[in-house]
Image (cartoon, grey):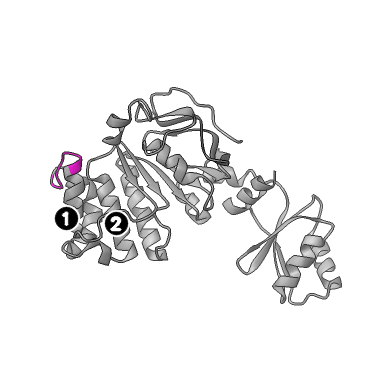
Amino acid sequence: MTGQAVNNNPMDAIIIDHLSKAFGDTRAVQDVSLTVREGELFGLIGPDGAGKTTLFKMLVTLLLPDAGRATVAGRDVVRDFRALRTMVGYMPGRFSLYPDLSVEENLSFFATVFGTTIEVNYDLIREIYVQLEPFKKRRAGALSGGMKQKLALCCALIHKPAVLFLDEPTTGVDAVSRREFWEMLQTLKKRGLTILVSTPYMDEAGQCDRIALMQNGRILAIDTPEGVEHLFRKPLFAVKASDTYQLIQDLRKAPFTVTCYAFGEFLHLTTKEGVSAASIQQYLIEKQHSNVVIKPIEAGIEDSFMALMEQ
């Protein structure tokens, strides 16, 4: 599945219809179509350079598309750009707040820009801001990565947006902060906020209601995380041995191999139909590998992503 039929369902908060953008010879976004429903937590999953940021910038009116159209909260991203800018919250991948202003000053500034106050919409950010309050007089530039992330989220929410765009919000932060951030997003989703989030981390895909896998400016698949995993239909084995480097070399040359990639301490080996763990073991013994471990496994999001890239 390389795209999604675009319709005018009033329950769709974001509608992207054959959107494209190029920079010279680089086609950053190529004929992308998808919809995001109201109240949905939708993930755009892909590595650096996949086109995620360019797509986000078109949706929040920072870039003009070369072709296609899109609407966010019922507003056209080109024709209605002025009105739309007051209706979306945008957290770019790079920390973009004022480092010399305090936590409190940054939040007050963004509230003022949107014609509101911290007090009016405090209920929306309360659970996040209470973690920042002990540091409200500290300069934003002196905060830890996790705290900068929370402050940026508060600033994106302070005007009560209809749709929240988060571009790689957990890149460069520690594992605990990543987990806390996704917990905050789940809380916001329960309140009915529509959220489009991008990430290069495949393990975060499971936090989303639906995901789109993106590579080289194109959408490879759109489905629930479980649905994307089920797209993988070939036999899959986890394999390890004493000499990992030689193991991957030998398996990639094996007559039964379709693909072989490193996944942590194991290699993930996709084989032709009818290949057994015993036949793989025999092949590796003949190649003089020791301490061989082979086990059939279920495919994950990353396995499906790699398989789709091969097509």
Residue 114 is one of the magenta-drawn residues: yes
Left or right, residue 98 beside residue 116: right
* Mark 1 or mark 2: whose residue is earlier in sequence: 1
Amino acid tagged 1: Glu
Image quadrant holding the C terminus, namely top right
**Residue at numbered disc 2:** 150
Rendered location of residue 98, percent (x, y):
25, 56
As drawn, the residue found furthest toward the front would be 24
Query: What residue is at 62 percent from the left and 44 percent from the top?
Result: 230
**Crowdedness of circle 1 by 10 Å Cα count: few (<14), some, many (20+)?**
some
Evaluate whether residue 121 shows in this view.
no
Can you tell which of label 1 and label 2 is closer to the viewer? 1
* Residue 264 seen in render: yes
Q: Main secondary structure of the magenta part?
A: loop
Residue 185, position as x, y percentages in the image: 35, 49
Q: How far from the left and from the top, in percent, is residue 70?
A: 43, 29
Indicate whether 273 appears above or below 163. below
Q: Which residues are magenta?
A: 113-119
The image's mark for residue 151 is none
Q: Residues within 10 Å of mark 2 (few under 14, many from 20)?
A: many
User: The residue tagged with tag 2: helix, strand or loop?
Assistant: helix
Q: Quadrant of residue 103?
A: bottom left
Find residue 68 and report its horizontal and vertical position in percent: 49, 27
26 over 199 or under it: above or below:
above
Left or right: where 265 falls relative to 291: left
170 and 142: which one is in front? 142
